[in-house]
Image (tube, rainbow, N blue to C red):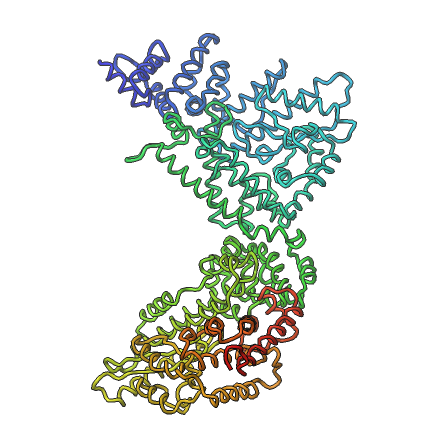
């Protein structure tokens, strides 16, 4: 038989990566070796040999398992009178499975068995058929030298744990618990050895050994420093206690692993042992955030367990107040960044512990959430990562999907870590770079090749998936903006018991604490997950509501929105997880009835608060396309209009929320933080929404009504719509114009155009759950007595023959909105000489404008209104500036084309630049118009209804002041009055012609 045939037969069992490896396996298995292989027939010696070979083939590294087994058998043959291992392997399937798994996965444990060839018996199946226990308990140490006996007992216990782990007899959590229990037992034994070595007659001190880190959390790995802190009872114990602690550290280093006491106060520079009182003094005065974070995992381990528990209990109040420090949250985040920075760059991508997407990402996220939320929820006070994460999920602090993602990532990464460390019993957290190491690791983790993908590729794919998800969730949880807000709430404020909640409501300034308490009980009552998440959110939201003039209204509005959306899966998840959404919502609900009403009708628009890009106005073209497309999807005009109005409602939510948040500091959209909000931009955005609504409604109306082929129809914007200065409750002031196609009787064209206009107004005027959009055509020739629609020629005839100066003034804001663009252009060209007369105005016309202005001011100002604070018609209000600017346009735009525009501030700036108005007067009027427009919009947002009167006191004034980013209502009102007075004076100068360059 050829050499190739011999090697191929053994290669089928996984032995050897080449001819030499297979030949070596043949020698170890043959008659001169283990006697499991017949060289002449190239097959197993017998049925038991076949079973053992099959078991070896399933090892993570069959060659390693075979070599180690051969070495153990050889050692046994040299030392034992009757070698029993091979016979036991044939007779005991459980032993065979456990021993082979250990030999193929751990060269270090294999070496231990070679040195101690009788230790394999610890893996044998018990007489009752049960596998050996692997719970971390040490066997008896015997009467010999204690340190070698402890070392042997430790290795035997570790061998049992590893065998159970590798064969599936213990899950990850059970393995970590067993390793932690073994550490406790080893610390206790080392403690006893150290005490036993004290000089005769030396009093034994009260000394506690507190487990920290992974050992404290019950999640120790195979090879790790064991973190501890030593605590003595009083000063008299310190000297002897330090001797014991020092010896304990030395013994453990000889037996198992290094003991690290660097987490103690002052680290390695501080005393090894401190008294309980000294610890308390240090933590009260000097401890930093990371030191309290480390205390989350403190657990009694050895020595005086009662003293250890007393130490933990005494420090607990300090731990659960640590998150209230102003710098606490940022400290934890900074510590995580520092850990990543300290990883060598060449290892960063292969580090499963400290690198991005590693175990530390999970641990830091969980621990920060514990520090912040555990102050008020004792169920989160778990030292272990997995129990703490499960408690966070159960309490609603982490979403179920996010929690499962972190749990999967943690189990995967810890599994990789265990296999890496078990191989050589070395402390390592780095995935090997060389191909052979990767193949071994993939096999040790039970990955197998599939068609088209190797085991290593399958492992890498899972590793990348888990690391990416862990990194994403780490960033999401660790940098959750809500954390800082929760951390600022006192611990008592997090416990929403009825008595505590009522006291907090009174402190926060709720006018009706009993009513507010009923809302809280309705939101947080019961044991549902929704109630649990509400209990997390509400302490923060209450603080936000308390900053508003009417905290009770904010809470009521929040309850109403929650009642509508509470059963929606994404609602509370968005509030808890998505950026500053919860605090943004609290500001909107507590300050703006207008925005609250919109949200109650369109609650899903709440998602807009999560994304910066969603809080910026959409371009007019995008809106028109979207609105028109929505209407086109419906053949029923009513349904089409409902779709359009729903989009309009959503856009109004977008603009209103952005306006409410614009001056809210860190809650403001990024664009608003970078440049101050511009009321002109708000007006233009609102006008664009109206343009899009009219565009879609016109399309629907024309599709509904009998039409005349070739009929051209256009909608002309007037008033605030035409000037791009709409407010939240503006009607759409329009003119309707048409042009009959050649050969069509004028009466037919007029009737068709009138039908289109009436249908448009009817559709937009139907009752619906959104702010109404009135389509007002009263600025048409002859007002309400005139026809609703006119032809282009009829408009031209009227304006040439009958129009008065106020109608020319109204045309200053006329612009094409929708319909036939050519007709719109022709209309604008037709009215150019009317609104921009070449020769300006006669003296009589100027006097007429002044007279109408005075009459409007007298007759249209509401009864009882305060002219000093009426934003529209009051002294220094919007009308003052607009009439002055329009007078300038009527007088001079014929000779100064730069004045030709529909926007008030644009025309004012052009007049200033042309020398037609004093720069100081222009500045005063611009400031007055801007302030009045801002206050008017804010009034509408606060009240939720139309209103132009700025109150001199009360919650509405306070709401306006807060919306506009001011502090003191009295100072704000004084500044408004000063600005209005200067604006009024400037207006009078312009209206009376008191400007240097003209008379």
Horizontal and vertical percent position of residue 347: 46, 31
Viewer-nearest residue: 644 or 96: 644
Viewer-nearest residue: 639 or 133: 639
**Residue depicted at x 55% and y 34%:** 219
Q: Decide: is 107 above or below 496.
A: above
Quadrant housing residue 466: top left
**Residue depicted at x 27% and y 20%:** 9
Q: Decide: is 846 above or below 134.
A: below
Outermost residue to the front: 997
Horizontal and vertical percent position of residue 541: 59, 59
Viewer-nearest residue: 199 or 571: 571
Q: Is residue 952 left or right of residue 462?
A: right
Horizontal and vertical percent position of residue 918: 53, 74
Q: Is residue 845 left or right of residue 33?
A: right
Q: Where is the N terminus found, in terms of image quarters?
A: top left
Q: How many marks?
A: 0
Horizontal and vertical percent position of residue 928: 56, 73
Viewer-nearest residue: 181 or 492: 492
Residue 782 can be seen in this image = yes
Residue 593 can be seen in this image = no
Q: Decide: is 194 above or below 329.
A: above
């Amino acid at each position: 038989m050829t050499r190739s045939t011999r090697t191929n037969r053994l290669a089928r069992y996984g032995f050897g990566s080449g001819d030499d490896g297979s030949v070596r396996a043949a020698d170890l298995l043959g008659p001169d070796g283990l006697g499991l292989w017949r060289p002449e027939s190239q097959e197993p010696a017998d049925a038991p040999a076949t079973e053992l070979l099959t078991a070896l083939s399933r090892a993570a590294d069959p060659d390693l398992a075979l070599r180690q087994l051969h070495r153990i058998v050889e050692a046994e043959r040299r030392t034992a009178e009757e070698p029993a291992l091979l016979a036991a392997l044939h007779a005991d399937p459980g032993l065979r499975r456990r021993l082979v798994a250990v030999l193929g996965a751990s060269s270090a444990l294999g070496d231990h068995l070679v040195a101690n060839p009788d230790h394999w018996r610890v893996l044998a199946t018990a007489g009752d058929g049960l596998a050996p226990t692997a719970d971390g308990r040490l066997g008896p140490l015997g009467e010999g030298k204690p340190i070698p006996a402890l070392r042997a007992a430790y290795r035997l216990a570790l061998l049992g744990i590893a065998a159970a782990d590798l064969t599936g007899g213990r899950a990850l959590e059970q393995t970590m618990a067993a390793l932690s229990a073994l550490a406790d037992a080893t610390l206790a034994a080392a403690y006893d050895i150290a005490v036993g070595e004290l000089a005769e007659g030396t009093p034994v001190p009260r000394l506690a050994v507190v487990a920290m880190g992974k050992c404290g959390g019950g999640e120790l790995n195979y090879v790790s420093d064991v973190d501890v802190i030593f605590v003595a009872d009083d000063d008299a114990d310190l000297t002897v206690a330090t001797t014991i602690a020092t010896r304990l550290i030395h013994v453990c280093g000889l037996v198992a692993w290094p003991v690290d006491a660097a987490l103690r106060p002052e680290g390695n520079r501080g005393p090894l042992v401190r008294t309980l009182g000294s610890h308390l003094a240090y933590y009260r005065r000097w401890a930093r955030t990371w030191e309290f974070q480390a205390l989350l995992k403190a657990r009694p381990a050895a020595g005086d367990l009662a003293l250890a528990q007393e130490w933990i209990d005494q420090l607990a109040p300090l731990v659960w107040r640590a998150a209230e420090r102003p710098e606490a949250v940022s400290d934890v985040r900074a510590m995580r960044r520092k850990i990543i920075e300290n990883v060598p760059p060449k290892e960063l991508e292969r580090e499963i512990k400290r690198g991005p997407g590693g175990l530390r990402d999970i641990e830091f996220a969980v621990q920060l959430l514990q520090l912040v939320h555990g102050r008020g929820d004792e169920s989160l006070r778990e030292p272990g990562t997995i129990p703490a994460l499960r408690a966070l999920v159960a309490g609603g602090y982490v979403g179920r999907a996010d929690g499962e993602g972190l749990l999967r990532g943690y189990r995967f990464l810890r599994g990789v870590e265990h296999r890496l460390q078990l191989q050589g019993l070395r402390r390592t957290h780095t995935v090997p770079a060389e191909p052979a190491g990767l193949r071994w690791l993939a096999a040790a983790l039970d990955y197998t090749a599939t068609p088209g993908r190797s085991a290593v590729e399958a492992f890498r794919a899972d590793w990348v998936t888990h690391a990416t998800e862990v990194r994403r969730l780490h960033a999401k949880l660790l940098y959750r903006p809500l954390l800082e807000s929760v951390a600022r709430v006192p611990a008592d404020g997090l416990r929403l018991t009825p008595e505590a909640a009522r006291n907090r409501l009174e402190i926060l300034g709720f006018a009706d604490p009993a009513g507010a308490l009923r809302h809280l009980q309705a939101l947080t009552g019961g044991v549902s997950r929704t109630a649990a998440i509400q209990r997390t959110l509400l302490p923060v939201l209450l603080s936000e509501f308390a900053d508003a003039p009417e905290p009770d209204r904010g809470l009521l509005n929040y309850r109403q929105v929650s009642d509508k959306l509470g059963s929606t899966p994404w609602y509370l998840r968005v509030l808890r997880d998505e950026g500053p959404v919860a605090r943004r919502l609290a500001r909107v609900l507590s300050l703006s009835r207008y925005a609250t009403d919109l949200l109650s009708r369109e609650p899903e628009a709440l998602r807009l608060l999560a994304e910066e890009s969603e809080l910026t106005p959409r371009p007019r073209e995008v809106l028109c396309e979207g609105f028109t497309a929505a209407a086109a999807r419906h053949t029923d005009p009513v349904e089409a209009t409902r779709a359009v109005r729903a989009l309009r409602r959503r856009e109004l939510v977008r603009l209103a929320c952005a306006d409410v948040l614009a001056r809210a500091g860190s809650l403001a959209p990024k664009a608003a933080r970078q440049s101050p909000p511009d009321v002109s931009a708000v007006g233009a955005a609102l006008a664009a929404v109206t343009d899009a609504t009219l565009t879609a409604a016109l399309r629907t109306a024309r599709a509904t009504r009998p039409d005349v082929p070739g009929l051209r129809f256009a909608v002309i914007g007037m008033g605030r719509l035409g000037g791009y200065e709409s407010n939240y409750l503006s009607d759409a002031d329009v003119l309707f114009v048409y042009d009959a196609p050649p050969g069509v009787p004028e009466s037919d064209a007029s009737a068709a155009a009138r039908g289109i206009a009436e249908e448009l107004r009817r559709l937009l005027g139907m009752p619906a759950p959104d702010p109404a959009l009135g389509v007002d055509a009263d600025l048409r020739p002859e007002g309400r007595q005139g026809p609703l629609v006119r032809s282009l020629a009829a408009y031209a005839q009227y304006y040439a023959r009958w129009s008065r100066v106020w109608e020319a003034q109204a045309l200053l804001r006329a612009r094409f909105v929708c319909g036939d663009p050519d007709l719109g252009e022709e209309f604008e060209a037709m009215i150019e000489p009317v609104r921009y007369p070449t020769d300006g105005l006669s003296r009589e016309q100027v006097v007429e404008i002044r007279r109408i202005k005075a009459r409007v001011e007298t007759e249209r100002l509401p009864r009882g209104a305060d002219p000093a604070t009426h934003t529209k018609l009051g002294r220094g209000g919007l009308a003052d500036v607009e009439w002055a600017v329009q007078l300038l346009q009527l007088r001079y735009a014929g000779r100064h084309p730069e004045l030709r525009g529909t926007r008030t501030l644009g025309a004012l700036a052009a007049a200033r630049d042309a020398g037609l108005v004093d720069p100081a007067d222009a500045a005063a009027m611009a400031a007055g118009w801007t302030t009045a427009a801002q206050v008017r919009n804010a009034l509408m947002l606060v009240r939720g209804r139309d209103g132009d009167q700025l109150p001199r006191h009360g919650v509405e004034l306070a709401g306006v002041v807060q919306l506009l980013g001011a502090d003191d209502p009295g100072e704000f009102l004084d500044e408004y009055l000063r600005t209005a007075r200067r604006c009024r004076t400037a207006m009078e100068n312009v209206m009376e012609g008191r400007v240097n360059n003209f008379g």
